[in-house]
Amino acid sequence: MELTVEGLSVARGGMPVLEGLTFTLTTGNILILRGPNGSGKTTLLRTLAGLQPPLAGRIGLPPEAIAYGAHADGLKATLSVAENLTFWARVYGTTDIEPALAQFNLKGLRNRAAHSLSAGQKRRLGLARLLVTGRRFWLLDEPTVSLDQASVGLFADAVRSHVAGGGAALIATHIDLGLAAETLDVAPFRADPDRPTRTPTAFDEAFT
Amino acid sequence: MIALLVRDLRLAVRAGGGFGLGLAFFLIVTVLVPFAVGPEGETLARIAPGILWVGALLACLLSLDRIFQLDFEDGSLDLLATAPLPMEGAVVVKALAHWLTTGLPLTLAAPVFGILMNMQAPGHWWIFVTLLIGTPALSMIGAFGAALTVGLKRGGLLLSLLVLPLYVPTLIFGAEAATRGGAGMAVTTPILMLAGITAGVVAFLPFAAAAAIRINIR
């Protein structure tokens, strides 16, 4: 299975941010996205996840293969750790949350309400969600924000075992995760902001 | 889908979920009306179905902005959009959860609150029946309005302005059927219209709401 991207252009708020992006990610591999703030990494990941349409180009990926990990963890504050994770497991049609709890060292916290977790613990719970999706391609947006050194290690281990088990990961990050991975710097693909373009906005689309 | 329903119901009854808020508001409205219009039993009995319908409608409005806004703010709406659940299905389930936590309690409470309005015997039954048929439409239209305004700061007021005019047909036929039923007249026509509105709304609006959400989370 592979994720192929050909000549992809993505836009944020009607302004093109990345143009002419071409790469392939096959299972068993990790691709690290690099680029300065505002260079369009998040927009690229959101486009690949299907949350917004691309401006141009083609995205080829097998159906039901993507698990998207956003900046926000999507946790419900009044639900416990186990309830939060069980919900996502059931949405994705899986049942066993124990490996995910163990992987991210959350077993001792399973009955704690999510609002009483620290920022790093919340992030770990957000990342544990990826394991219960059972999806092959992980699209991760700055997954290590607010994680301590040990938790970054846990996360790197999780990615390694996921990839070893036939998965793949596309990770936008600024730090060195210590993973054997290829790197894609998006800076050369940045769209020229001065070049006049006519891009369809949501408003136009409502009338087409 | 059941997982989402269970989660939303659980969130509604946990602290800060707002369960019971609409019901308390409904009770206060029905208590306030006799203070405002005076205690004559005859007047109250005559306006009871209309007041109960307006009260239920306003109580329903209170919790509408929570349907999608909270999920949008904590990022779970994005994650739901990438999940295998179709967005249309998520909209239906969330509207159903809203109805179970708001519309259904209002429906069950209305006959009891009718006593405060000096409602007479067959009237209790008909206010129950009309609300049972009509409130699902209120939740579904509300979910559509919430989908349109999701992501807007302070979208709650705009939501009310959008949704209240759409509630008018349900209110007209619901209150009419309840009034006629209470007076012992034929109710078939308004009941059928009410049921038709609900059926149409439940059939079409999930698609419109899902499209609105997809545009709003871009």
Image: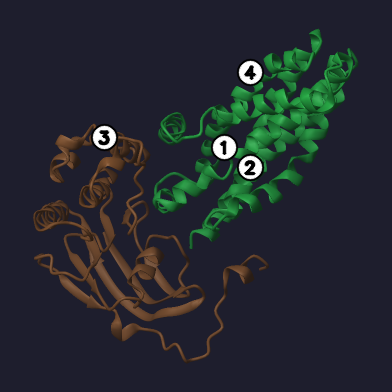
Chain colours: A brown, B green
Question: Could you say whether the residue bearing mark 3 is in a helix, strand or loop?
Answer: helix
Q: Is residue B116 visible?
A: yes
Residue topped by disc 4: B108
Question: Could you say whether the residue bearing mark 4 is in a helix, strand or loop?
Answer: helix
The residue that appears at 32% across and 71% down in the rendered structure is A41
Q: Pick whichever of labels 4 and 2 is earlier in the sequence.
A: 4
Q: Chain of mark 4?
A: B
Q: Residues within 10 Å of mark 4 (few under 14, many from 20)?
A: some
The residue that appears at 17% across and 64% down in the rendered structure is A29
Residue topped by disc 2: B142
Q: Using the numbered discs, state the Cα–Cα distance from disc 3 to disc 4 in whole angstroms.
A: 34 Å
Front position in the image: B118 or A96: B118
The verdict on a common chain for dots 4 and 1 is yes
The verdict on a common chain for dots 4 and 2 is yes
Residue topped by disc 3: A82
Q: Is residue B187 visible?
A: no
Measuring from the top left, give residue B185's x and y in whole percent: 91, 16
Q: Are marks 1 and 2 in contact (CB under 8 Å)?
A: yes
